[in-house]
Image (cartoon, rainbow, N blue to C red):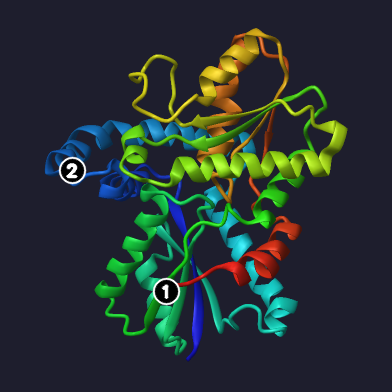
Amino acid sequence: MTTGLLLVQLGSPASLDANDIEVYLHQFLGDWHTTGKKSLFWQILLKYVILPKGKFTSLNKYKAMFDKHNFSEMPLVTYSEEFVNAVRKEFVSSQARAQGKVTDYASIRLAYQFGCKPSIGETLKQFEAEGIDTVHVLPLYPQRAGVTTDAATDNVTSATKAVNFKGNILFAAGFCQYDAWNREVAKSICEKIEEDDVLLISFHAIQSWRVKKGDPYRDDCEQSFKGICQSLTEIAGSKFSGEAHLVYQSKYKPGKLPSGKWLGPSLVETLQKLGQQKKPVTVVSPVFTADNLETIYEIDDEVSEVYYKAGGTRLTRIPCLNNRPSWITAFVEEILPALKFV
């Protein structure tokens, strides 16, 4: 048996081009996992009403992010590829691999669900060409959710059928339960947080009805929050005041959405209150492994504007773990050996 490791990332537009942005949004928003239900009406509305204008709204955000940070490609792509390349190098010298604690992967590859390349199907073909007959699949989402880990699993299953991959496919989902993840996030916070900062640990909002139907996402977010705070207290000591709040981001504009429809409290509403109280804030988003539009642009520009307009004094965003050396080592030495692929 020759085994490969497939790391699955959400994806992003292939380039800073309106057509590429439309392709990405159509694939992402058109996936029924994103909305939670299959609807022909939604597909029509998306294609003919939402995207013709919506792609330019997104384009303006991407352009603003590119101009401010001088990016040459989508940051999610840059950071994800740097992560996978670093994992490959770390794996070669890994003590866990040498001691047989982790599968001796013959190939480690990255694939994207939507937009950019390589797609999942293309990567499965590459595995097949390499003689890989068993693929271990890990979506790069720390918390489990129908809209993320389940979607990635279904996308891989569909791609397997589409390209007629004849090998075995085994899945693992979620890794926020491991101390290594909490510790590495806490270490990144400790490097920048000030003693008097209020810490906001921000996760992507989802609809509340998903949780009522048994989606594990909220439980995983709460577990992440507790684990990160505990690790931060152990690492930072007196540098961390202990004031931390779990919030949910990507639900914009206070009052725009009916109360109770999405998980809360929201990041933007919490920042507005903290801004009014003149409290300095540190924000971290451990729902992502790699920085992207929703961390770099949303926090640095959109929600920070709300905070400062309310009277805020200092907002610090902690980058995602990206390709931090200690995170790469922890991923290979601690998380990979602990995962159960079924």
Pointer 2 residue: 43
- Residue at the image position 25 percent from the left and 72 percent from the top: 162
- Residue at the image position 71 percent from the left and 25 percent from the top: 243
For the C terminus, the quadrant is bottom left
Q: CA distance from mark 2 to mark 1?
A: 31 Å
Considering the numbered disc 1 on the image, is that residue within a helix, a strand or a loop?
strand
Horizontally, is 245 left or right of 239 in the view? left
Residue 238 x/y as whole percent: 87, 32
Which one is in front in this view, the residue at disc 2 or the one at disc 1? 1
Residue 130 x/y as whole percent: 47, 87
- Residue 269 appears in the picture as rendered: yes
Pointer 1 residue: 170
The number of callouts visible is: 2
Image position of 151 with respect to 196: above or below:
below
Residue 121 x/y as whole percent: 35, 70
The amino acid at mark 1 is: Leu
Give the camera-side residue of 7 and 341: 341
Q: Residue 103 occupies which quadrant of the picture?
A: bottom right
Considering the numbered disc 2 on the image, is that residue within a helix, a strand or a loop?
helix
